Image: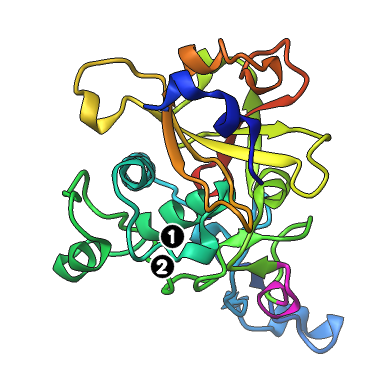
């Protein structure tokens, strides 16, 4: 959607390891034979992706170690921020909107960042962290179907019935792919998402922004940066903007302020892959 943020924010130009398999015991054919039966033998159940936390993603698609979560956050936010300075040719034009920025940065954060990757992405990219070790795009239990499109815990059938897809709009990101963490910016972590709902925008009332925290380009400067795409329309491709939360909180249109008093602000959310 083409958001009012673009129209009015002239002052802000800068702006989811298999669990241990269950065991079953071979019972004797008849109870009378129990004392003569051989010792029980542990047998592994058929292996398959499981979802112990029932968040819709198999556990093997989640980042379980602190190092992986931190490395993902650094790549995720750096790739998103880089789009403000120059759009990567790998981010296809038809995918460029607010949710598209999140999808693109998430997908690219899970790729191996080798020489070929840097060459594809374009100029102005540099190593920011080791690669995520536990999961590589396309090689995990969900392949490239990174996004949940329906409620419920993960089932292998989800890979073919549409419950897991390669696409998610802003509403789907919030409802099925992230968990609410609150409305207080002081609790936000790099890589968290901010969601807004603007019912007056009937076609695309949901909007998402990405909390970067401390921007790469700012060194030891402010740590409350946000990047987002303004949305596209047939008439306007929109653009990526970068802005401080402190400035966004003073937006001329109160409906776009990320503050608890604004009912259009749905709060901060954390991707399930990081839970």
Circle on res. 107: 1
Point out the frontmost of discs 2 and 1.
1
Instruction: Say whether residue 26 is visible.
Output: yes
Picture residue at 23% right of the left edge, 24% below the top: 218
Picture residue at 79% right of the left edge, 49% below the top: 203
Left or right of 185: which side holds 163? right
When asked about the image quadrant of residue 266, the answer is top right
Q: Residues within 10 Å of mark 2 (few under 14, many from 20)?
A: many
Picture residue at 41% right of the left edge, 27% below the top: 13
Q: Relative to the observer, which residue lies in front, 186 or 168?
A: 168
Left or right of 9: which side holds 54? right
Magenta stretch: give its range. 157-163
Report if residue 110 lies within the magenta region.
no
Instruction: Say whether residue 190 is visible.
Output: no
Q: Is residue 115 above or below residue 100?
A: below
Q: Is residue 238 above or below residue 193?
A: below
Q: Relative to the observer, which residue lies in front, 193 or 33?
A: 193
When asked about the image quadrant of residue 2, the answer is top right
**Residue 222 image offset from top left, x and y in percent:** 32, 15
Badge 1 marks a residue whose secondary structure is helix
Q: Is residue 110 above or below residue 129?
A: below
Q: CA distance from mark 2 to mark 1?
A: 7 Å
Q: Are marks 2 and 1 in contact (CB under 8 Å)?
A: yes
**Residue 228 image offset from top left, x and y in percent:** 49, 38
Q: What residue sits right under mark 2 in the picture? A: 137
Q: Residues within 10 Å of mark 1 (few under 14, many from 20)?
A: some
**Quarter of the rendering occupied by the C terminus:** top right
Badge 2 marks a residue whose secondary structure is loop
Left or right of 133: which side holds 130? left
**Residue 269 image offset from top left, x and y in percent:** 60, 34
**Residue 126 image offset from top left, x and y in percent:** 16, 49
Picture residue at 45% right of the left edge, 57% below the top: 104
């Amino acid at each position: 959607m083409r958001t009012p943020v673009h129209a009015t924010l002239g002052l802000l130009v800068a702006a989811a390891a298999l669990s241990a398999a269950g065991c079953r015991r071979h019972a004797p054919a008849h109870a009378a034979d129990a004392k003569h039966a051989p010792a029980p033998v542990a047998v592994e159940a058929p292996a398959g992706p499981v979802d112990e936390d029932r968040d819709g993603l198999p556990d093997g698609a989640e980042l379980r170690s602190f190092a992986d979560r931190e490395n993902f956050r650094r790549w995720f936010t750096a790739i998103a921020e880089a789009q403000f300075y120059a759009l990567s040719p790998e981010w296809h034009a038809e995918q460029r909107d607010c949710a598209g920025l999140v999808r693109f940065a998430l997908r690219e954060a899970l790729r191996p960042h080798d020489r070929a990757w840097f060459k594809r992405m374009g100029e102005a990219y540099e190593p920011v962290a080791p690669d995520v070790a536990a999961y590589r795009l396309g090689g995990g239990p969900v392949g490239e179907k990174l996004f949940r499109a329906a409620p419920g815990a993960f089932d292998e059938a989800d890979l073919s019935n549409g419950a897991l897809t390669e696409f998610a709009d802003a509403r789907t990101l919030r409802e099925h792919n992230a968990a609410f963490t609150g409305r207080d910016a002081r609790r936000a972590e790099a890589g968290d998402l901010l969601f807004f709902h603007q019912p007056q925008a009937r076609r695309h009332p949901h909007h998402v922004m990405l909390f970067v925290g401390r921007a790469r380009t700012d060194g030891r400067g402010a740590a409350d940066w946000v990047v987002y795409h303004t949305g596209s329309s047939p008439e306007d491709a929109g653009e990526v903007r970068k802005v401080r939360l402190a400035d966004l909180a003073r937006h001329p249109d109160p409906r776009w302020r990320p503050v608890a008093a604004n009912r259009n602000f749905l709060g901060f959310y954390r991707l399930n892959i990081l839970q």
